[in-house]
Amino acid sequence: MRIDVRAVKRLRESVDAAAVFGPIVQAIGASSADLSRVRVVCDWIQYKNNFREVVDHRPVLGAWPGRREDGGLEIAVDLRRCPDVDLATRVKEVLAEALADMPGGMSGGVPLAAERRTDGRADGRAAGSDGGPGGNRVTLEDWVPGRDSCVWRFNALYWQALSQWEKATGREYEQALPGGESDARNQEAVRELILELFKVWDDLDARQALPEELYIVELGVGNGNQARTWLDAFAELDVARGRDYYQRLHYLMGDYSPHVLERARKAVAHHGDRVNALVLDATRPAHTLGFLAGKAFLVYISNLYDNLPSDEVACIDGRMYQVEVRAYLPAAAARTIAQTYGLGPVSPGRGNPDRPPGDLGTVIDRLLRLGPELLSVSLPDRFPDTERAVAFWRDVWNGLRLQERYVPMAGLDLYEIAPSLSGEILRSVLEAAGDIRMHVNNGTLSSFADTLRLLHPYGRLQCHDLFLTDRRQYRTGFYGPGKYDGSVVNWVNGPLLQLIGNRRGFDVSFSPFKQRPSANVKTLTAQARD
């Protein structure tokens, strides 16, 4: 048995090591598990709202269907919430569930990971099985890579129905961020960026090389406050410097949600035709903004990359794995929600043919397809108004959890991170790191590579976000997924962004956010090499 601790600082400051590790070792040692194939991973999960139980298990699957070969079991423990539970009892329960869920078990010295069917499901259970004895989970989907999980449908719903969520909570989404606002709105930082841009334009203008039309792009506009802050400062500085750049400016706001764009457009209405709003897919911005290829002097992004779909991969004992997930509601939470909203019996499984129209899983699917307003229209007996439907949405989101398992990867070259981006780029990061689990940030890598095509030779991409700048950080902390209000957050794998940028001829650097250097937010800057 091996215990990995990923909370070194917190372990010293806040954890009673004897009270935590003693019960864990005793519970596992007293079980029938093959100890040579068990490892315990302890994280300090800083997000009070997240997708994990205090203690859970993750099977490490074997490479071939039906074959007994090296695999194993990982027990996951959240150190922050350990004092809230009877740890020894919970570890015993999780072990019993894990061993019952693995045919052939992990006992008797025979290491056996859950056998894999050719359809990718473990141990021959139908999609949506309850995940263990006692029916303690109501699953909402099949096993899928992280980026394909329905949690991202919830994430999309949050941005599409943001005004309704905010009305229910009584606060704007920015108040859910650390510090209560986005660092992108810092006036000093905005003015500094604009003055640097003016210097580039002045130099080009002196050589008669400045285009007539000056393009600025913002991706992920939120409520429009960032655009308003930037444009107001730009207009003021342009007047003060006696230039005519404002009259030549085209500020393009891009977001996938028409509702969010309309809200942002109202925030900058006083800038008139200087601003245009475009609906786009943030993971593939060039599909909509292709006409800007080589023309954008600045692509400005804040708090977007950490909110895009992501897989996770791992290297365990020299073998590469992909983390698959399955969204579920704990049975107790599912029963409470069903009773509160007058829904039918809680039946496990996504796509269960025996589900009645009013079954909890069916209604959740309908919520994700229609949104809360139309859910109320379609089921008025259960949701007499939109507010009731939003309350249902919030309760489901609060209860939502993710099961996880490790599935062997056939080869990094066969893994597609994004269109035209092979998993081969992961090799240098994974193979040099030993045992590690890290985010791929598929949506972010796709967006970043696509956006570089838009930049003018003297242009830059600047992004404020939650960046990891060293792969070794993954060994010392938890970096998502967490819940920010109604959305998903994952920290961003900076070394992978640097690899992609460097291969395309761009220098990619990270620096502390100058106006708040102690913040977790860092500034990424990408510019073409001289």
Image (tube, grey):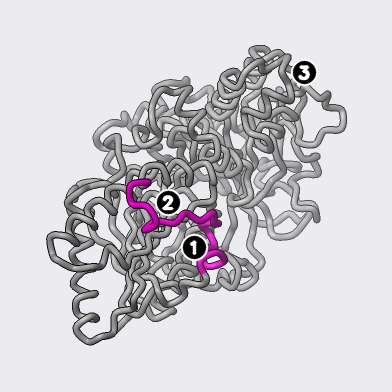
Please state which of residues 328 and 17 is positioned toward the viewer in this rendering.
328
Nearer mark to the viewer, of 1 and 3 = 1
Please count the marks in the image.
3
- What amino acid type is highlighted by mark number 1? Ser
Kindly indicate whether the residue at mark 2 contacts the one at mark 1 (C-beta within 8 angstroms). yes
Q: Earlier in the sequence, mark 1 or mark 3?
A: 3
Q: Which residues are magenta?
A: 269-289
| Residue plotted at (63% across, 42% down) | 150
Q: Earlier in the sequence, mark 2 or mark 3?
A: 2
Rounded to the nearest angstrom, the CA distance separating label 2 from label 3 is 39 Å
- What amino acid type is highlighted by mark number 2? Leu
* Label 1: element kind: helix
- Residue picked out by circle 3: 345
Q: Which mark is residue 304?
A: 2
- Residue picked out by circle 1: 447
Indicate the position of residue 153 as horizontal and vertical percent values: 61, 42
| Residue plotted at (40% across, 44% down) | 478
